[in-house]
Image: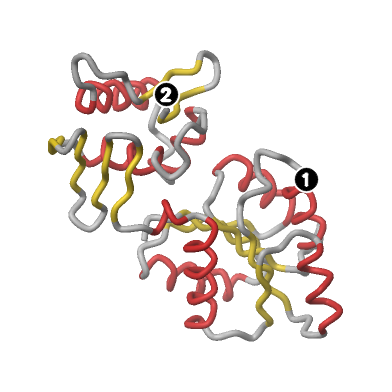
Amino acid sequence: MSANIYIVEDEEPIITLIKYNLEKEGYKVFFSENGNDGIKGIKNSLPDLVLLDWMLPDFSGVEICKNLKKDIKFKNIPIIMLTAKGEEEDKIKGLNSGADDYITKPFSFPELLARVKALLRRSKPSVVADIVEFEDLKIDRMTRRVYRKKKEIHLGPKEYDLLNFFIKNPKRVYSREQILENVWSENINVENRTIDVHIRRLRQNINIIGVKELIRTVRSAGYSLS
């Protein structure tokens, strides 16, 4: 799996358990322990799925869910609500706030993982598919091989990670900060010019003479695959 998952949860043991097990499955995991940081983190990192606790020290999960779903930039990020509330009325309230699924504490990790996989397959198939194509470009995630017009292209590890990130949401523009957050993760020493260097290398590798470029620079905004 190459999906990025964001956890908003105030109980450290639950964060530790979910993070450890998701990372074992190949997911990249980010987290916050309160709603305010969670909203900022989600909007900055643009995860592929959010695990959102209902009861947080500042905002409720319902408030956060409504906040995200009313913004066109974030409304399509799938959300699974985590809660100790098991009544049908609470479940309906959570789903009506925009949550895509609902799981009651305590839960087993296999159940949570099954919900995560099912939701990603339904909402973001390009994130979990072994082979992803965009126009004449193809990525085989099982072998980490890239092809353009059926010809194999050899990329460095970081250029592959960049392309794999872009192809999850073709045509979406990502800022350098969002690219740094998702591709370099916790390495805070990476500068913007380092990102630009790797983008340039990626362009040089996937461009074909006489065929349109696939990596677009959007002035004052960032980059996209389009």
Residue on which disc 1 sits: 70
Of 24 and 170, nearer the camera is 170
Q: Secondary structure at mark 1?
A: loop
Q: Is residue 105 above or below residue 176?
A: below
- The spot of residue 122 in percent (x, y) is 52, 62
- The spot of residue 191 in percent (x, y) is 40, 26
Question: Relative to 104, is 30 on the left or the right?
Answer: left
Type of amino acid at the residue the image marks with label 2? Asn
Residue density around tag 1, few if under 14, some if 14–19, many if 20 or more, within 10 Å? few
Type of amino acid at the residue the image marks with label 1? Lys
Residue density around tag 2, few if under 14, some if 14–19, many if 20 or more, within 10 Å? few
What distance separates the C-alpha of mark 2 from that of mark 1? 31 Å
Q: Is residue 126 above or below residue 45?
A: below
Q: Is residue 40 above or below residue 49?
A: above
- The spot of residue 145 in percent (x, y) is 18, 46
Of 45 and 193, nearer the camera is 45
At horizontal 15% and vertical 35% (from top left) the residue drawn is 153
Colour basis = secondary structure
Q: Quadrant of the C terminus?
A: top left
The reply to whether callout 2 and callout 1 are in contact (CB within 8 Å) is no
Q: Secondary structure at mark 2?
A: helix
Residue 221, picture quadrant: top right
Question: Relative to 181, is 91 on the left or the right?
Answer: right
Residue 217, picture quadrant: top left
Depth check, mark 2 against mark 1: the one in front is 1
At horizontal 52% and vertical 53% (from top left) the residue drawn is 48
Q: Quadrant of the N terminus?
A: bottom left
Residue on which disc 2 sits: 192
